[in-house]
Amino acid sequence: MKIIYVVGNHIGHVSHILPLYTVLGGEIFCTATDENWHKIQKYVPTIKFRRNVEFFKEYEPDVIVYLDWGERQDLRFWTENLKAKHVWVPHGLSPKSFEGYKEKIDDFDVYFAASSYELIVLRDHGVNLDKVKFAGYPKFDTHLYQHIIAQPEVEDEGYTLYAPTWGGYSSIPKAYSRIKELTDRGEIVYVKAHPQVGLISWGDDNGPAYEKLCELPVKIIDKKAPNILEYIKKSSRVISDRGTVFFEAISMGKKVEVFYEVNTEFKKRIDLYNKPGMSAPYFEGSSFHTQLSVNMIQLVNLI
């Protein structure tokens, strides 16, 4: 089976497809700008990214894996007449993974779901659940790709990690006083913002508030760093908002503070991730390898 994995401008997306790539092989196509492509290569120097769209026709893939609807749209002209199955692998556990697409979401042949929440959203958007395969959360299985992607060396343990998302969902404008309170007490605080924070071209206007926050005695993690799991693992507290990190921290059993109006709908989502057997489990061994293989066998049977 020939697979192409599509990665866009976000280095963080790479860690979601590397477990699949490691187990199943294939090729990785990158639609990023030249600037972001070079940044991605810095973190995964051994990966050969395909860049020429003609490669889709030359390779004749059986499966094309996407992490975002945007890449599906960008490549539609080059992929629509191929015989390949189009597969959705969500690039996070956040509710935002689906909310922005509305009726566009029913645009794939197969969907991988990380939790029961994704199943609910897909169903509510009219997706036939026969297309949906429960695959857990590939990013959590770090042992499958830690030899490929640059791993951070985290000096401290027991610190607070503040990891805000971007745009209108971001908590950055509200977080200054809380982070200052912690640093005034002498606590160690790491800050890892979403890569799009401060990018006006993407509609994010949190740059000034983020720069002010960074003036505090905090430890700044590169916004483009590809994998935050090691920082979550060694923290004692995670402060976040509606971003994926919030749900990753819950799934990893961390104490979490959330800067967000926890309305009834959002509370339902939090409860789903807290309920045993409903959230994406944190695999340490090879069990997730088997989970992936089983689901890809099911995928092969659909082709």
Image (cartoon, grey):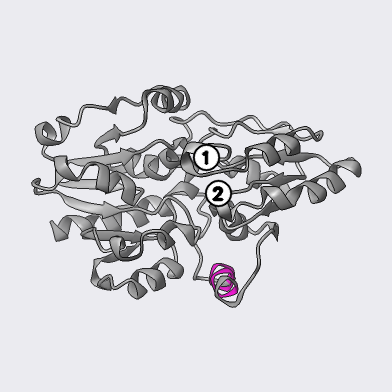
Task: Locate residue 134 relative to residue 80 in the image: left or right.
Answer: right
Specify the quadrant that holds the N terminus. Answer: top left
Q: Main secondary structure of the magenta part?
A: helix
Mark 1 nearby-residue class (10 Å; few <14, some 14–19, many ≥20)? many
Callout 2 secondary element: helix
Write down the residue under mark 1.
196
From the viewer's side, name the closer residue of 33 and 14.
Answer: 33
Callout 1 secondary element: loop
Q: Is residue 205 magenta?
A: no
In the image, what residue type sits under mark 1? Answer: Gln
From the viewer's side, name the closer residue of 289 and 252.
Answer: 252
Task: Locate residue 61 relative to residue 111 in the image: left or right.
Answer: left
Tell me where residue 160 appears, x and y as whole percent. 75, 46
The residue located at (44%, 65%) in the rendering is: 115
Write down the residue under mark 2.
167
The residue located at (59%, 43%) in the rendering is: 205
In the image, what residue type sits under mark 2? Answer: Gly
Q: Residue furthest right?
A: 185
Q: Is residue 156 visible?
A: no
Mark 2 nearby-residue class (10 Å; few <14, some 14–19, many ≥20)? some
Tell me where residue 57 appears, x and y as whole percent. 10, 35
Q: Is residue 272 magenta?
A: yes
Q: Are marks 1 and 2 in contact (CB under 8 Å)?
A: yes
Magenta extent: 267-274
Q: Is residue 131 visible?
A: yes
The residue located at (63%, 48%) in the rendering is: 164
